[in-house]
Image (tube, rainbow, N blue to C red):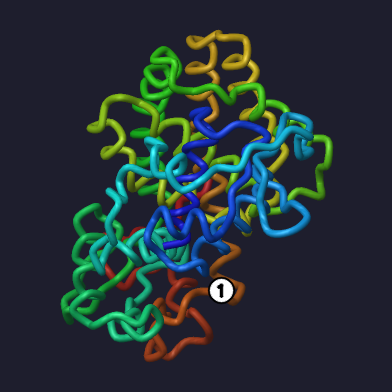
Amino acid sequence: MHFRIRGVIAEAIVAGWLVPGDVLFEATVAEALLTSRTPVRTALELLREEGRLVKLPGRGYGVIGRDGAAPQSQRRIGREAFVALPSASEFGGRAPAAWSRIYAEVEAEVGGGAIFGPLRIIELEIAKIYGVSRTVARDVLSRIERVGLIYKDERNFWRVTPLTAERASDLYELRRALEPVALRRAAEGGRYHAARDMRDRLARAYNRLPYVTPLEICAFERELHIDLISLCDNPEIIQALRVGQLQLAANRQLFAKMPHGFRQILSEHLAVADRLAENDIGGAAEALRRHLSEAKVAYIEHAAEIAALTPATLPPYLQFDSDDGLPYGGYRRTCLSEIDAVRPFRHA
């Protein structure tokens, strides 16, 4: 739920529906979305960590200006104003279905676990953690299966579809073909108004290297490859990009394993933001295409190698097999050969 709420607010900021100086309150957002305050609080804290909001004295969170500070002029966003946001319309003024309350978070966690191989997914653990029935947990997994993030093995166990070098290459090829088109349509449609804000935040982060965290990099990736791209008016493009975005653009586990690439990532994001800020839409699309080069697959290979040798912090419902007779995560060090679809990582 907190990922869904974060998405509603982030999209509103990116699209310019919420502007610097607007103030959000936990109670107001919770009332508008018909949910409890706990996931709202978590969502607001995530946005604060990403540099989109600042915690104000008292209870509110303010939308940050380009200089990274809270504006002096403030405007409280009430329930009616929040409900009126286009990004909040999917909630429809009514409580969401049981499966939809946990879907986004489970989907994101599953996508993040892809670099660790064909992890087993324990349906009963999902039900326990989220306080839902096993039927609801099964419904969530069935829906995630439809987008290709998970599958059932020969023993009828749910498994995470592994992110191999070959799969990463295929997903990058798809993204390289479609994301520049989506960016162009989003920018030409006048739906994106935060290019200068993005450029300023990227420049500040670049100047702080090497003291930039994986969470910040993940936030920048999400802003460019998900938040901005989602403003494209072609839903078929958005749907086609979904798996690649979940396994690559929003994968915190992945960025935690590849700090050596942060300088290049920020530099390439700046190239896109610079052109967008100058209304050079064609140049921005070309800079994005270069950012999604085949060379990025080498980062995936390196991250997977590190993942094979280090313990992973994963939710309890994502588990490594314990019956392979090898040390911790041993099957990962055998190039994930448990299923035919997984091939050894290729090295240049």
Instruction: Give the x, y percent position of residue 228.
Output: 47, 31
Amino acid type at mark 1: Ala
- Name which residue lies at 69% across and 43% down: 262
Estimate the x, y position of residue 48 in percent, counting from the top left. 66, 51
**In this view, 180 is above or below 220:** above
**Residue 95 position within the rendered picture, expressed as x and y whole percent measured from the top left:** 29, 61
User: Is 139 left or right of 222, judged from the image as shown?
Assistant: left
Q: Provide residue 189's location: percent of width, then percent of height.
A: 39, 15
Residue 221 visible = yes
Tell me what residue is drawn at x 26 percent, y 75 percent: 137
Look at the picture and state if 330 lies above or below 204.
Answer: below
In this rendering, the answer to whether 276 lies above or below 55 is above
Task: Work out whether residue 86 or residue 110 is closer to the camera in this orientation and state it.
Answer: 86
- Local secondary structure at mark 1: loop
Give residue 323's quadrant in the image. bottom left
Identity of the residue drawn at 61% across and 50% down: 47
Crowd around label 1: few <14 · some 14–19 · many ≥20 (10 Å): some
- Residue 205 visible here: no
- Identified at 37% across, 24% down, the residue is 182
Q: Is residue 279 left or right of residue 330?
A: right
Residue 33, image quadrant: bottom left
131 or 253, which is in the foreground?
Answer: 131
| Residue carrying label 1 | 312
